[in-house]
Image (cartoon, rainbow, N blue to C red):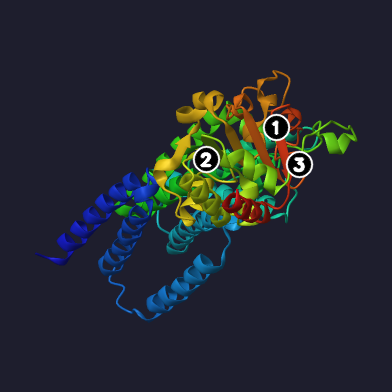
Amino acid sequence: MDLSTLVELAYLASAVLFVVGLKRMQSPATARPGNALAASAMLLAILATLVDNQVLDWTGILIGVVLGGLIGAVAARTVKMTAMPEMVGLFNAFGGGASAMVAAAEYVRLQEAGALMAAGTGVTIALSLLIGAVTFSGSVIAFGKLNGMVTGNPVTFPGQKPVNALLFVVILALGGMVAGLLAVVGGLTPLTTFAVFSGLALLLGVLLVIPIGGADMPVVISLLNSYSGLAASAAGFIIGNMVLIISGALVGAAGLFLTMLMCKAMNRSLANVMFGAFGQAGGKAALASGEKKPVRSVDAEQAALVMAYAQSVIVVPGYGLAVAQAQHELKKVMDLLTERGVDVRFAVHPVAGRMPGHMNVLLAEADVSYDLLYDLDEINDDFKNTDVVLIVGANDVVNPEARDPQSVIAGMPILDVAYARNVIVVKRSLSPGFAGIDNPLFYMENTMMFFSDAKKAMSDVAKEVREA
């Protein structure tokens, strides 16, 4: 069996591992080994590519592997769960940027060699550069919005949509010149045209993300992940690498499906997310307006008594749980209640947190059984028969304002916690969530507000449940 056959078999095995790994990521119970399979597939594909291209000087490769491995290990150990969305945003940026650099390198190589570029190759290079550059700059802005370096509010200006449309038309024209489908005009050299095309593509990525508010960031992260996959697939066509084409297409398709599911969970179209400037501040928050509304507050002892003598408790986790790193203390409360015979389950909204699956990963970190996690559709009908709902750091996903046609979250599917007999909300204050609007749930007769840091609140409740 010759070397080329072995390389093709390695590529085939890598593609199969990618598919199996992606399949296993459907469930939290198998996601970790699925991720390991996908990582192994990528390692195998890289090794096969190096052998296929006769890259025999391994010194630089090994240095890159060691440095990359160290950076990855440090990041995995030190990045907090609350910073996971930002890290995913950076991963998307790196993926898009790498694909764009592959396209740029191939274009420069062809220009310097004076080779006649086929139309198909030119189109692929232009698409890879466009998608990769938009992914890179858009992901950097998303990263900035998530970690506070850039305002989380939508950034808009007069005529923004026409400007974006005009910019896109100009980019398409320049892309046609880069691909060789249109003649270069104005005395521009091919490399100058390529540089201008690249710069405008980066600008488009910025302009597409800045008008999107913090409430829509989970959808944006998912969409940009899809873009990074498409850019990688296009790069695979450029260099003729089948496994890169397959893996990129898988990432692109998976990201797109996830994006559509996220949009469905928010009852919003993708176009509305991208161009609606949702998630801005300035909603009708009670504290912001100065309006005083009566609330019923409780302390740890009262909250513990209500839950300790209940038959059923549903926990709704949110981003506040991640911020406080309260998942382990919450697990203690759950275990103590379970020992008393209380039926405890978790209701996880599809867009809870700041990225898809954020709450599932957080709870898995605390060894909460996957069997206790229920999606919105699975558990929503059970709230009306539940004694206590414990909300830890969630806001918009339980906001009854979604039923108001005039609300900015109108139609968004929510967890129907208001129908439970008792609702305990653990929150620092009455401040609004990402959507920037007040939550009427806080002022309902069956709601009790437990104003505290989530970690301290769960620790105090655990102590009181032991003594109840």
Viewer-side label of 1, 2: 1
Q: Is residue 414 left or right of residue 228?
A: right
- Indicate the secondary structure of the residue bearing disc 3: loop
Q: As shown in the figure, which amino acid type bears the numbered disc 2? A: Leu
The residue carrying mark 3 is: 155
- Please tell me which residue lies in front, 446 or 429: 446
Q: Which residue is mark 1?
A: 447
Q: Residue at x 69, y 48 (%)?
A: 300
Marks 2 & 3, CB-CB < 8 Å contact: no
- Percent coordinates x, y for residue 285 in the rendering: 81, 34
> Three-letter amino acid code at disc 1?
Thr
Determine which residue is flagged by label 2.
Answer: 182
Q: Nearer the viewer, mark 2 or mark 3?
A: 3
Q: Amino acid under label 3?
A: Val
Depth check, front residue: 163 or 304: 304
Q: Dot 1: what SS?
A: strand
Closer to the chain start, of discs 2 and 3, is 3
Q: How busy is the neighbourhood of tag 3: few (under 14 within 10 Å), some, or many (20 plus)?
A: some
Along the line of sight, the residue nearer the viewer: 142 or 9: 142
- The residue located at (53%, 25%) in the rendering is 385
- Is the N terminus in the top left, top right, bottom left or bottom right quadrant? bottom left
| Left or right of 328, for residue 165 | right
Q: What secondary structure is found at the residue carrying circle 2?
A: loop
Asked if 123 appears above or below 283 in the picture, the reply is below
- Residue 293 appears at what percent x and percent y? 84, 31
Disc 1 or 3, which lies upstream in sequence?
3
Q: CA distance from mark 1 to mark 3?
A: 35 Å
Residue at 76%, 33% (x, y): give it.
437
Q: Position of residue 173 (x, y in %)?
A: 58, 39
Query: Which class describes the residues within 10 Å of circle 2: few (<14), some (14-19), or many (20+)?
Result: few
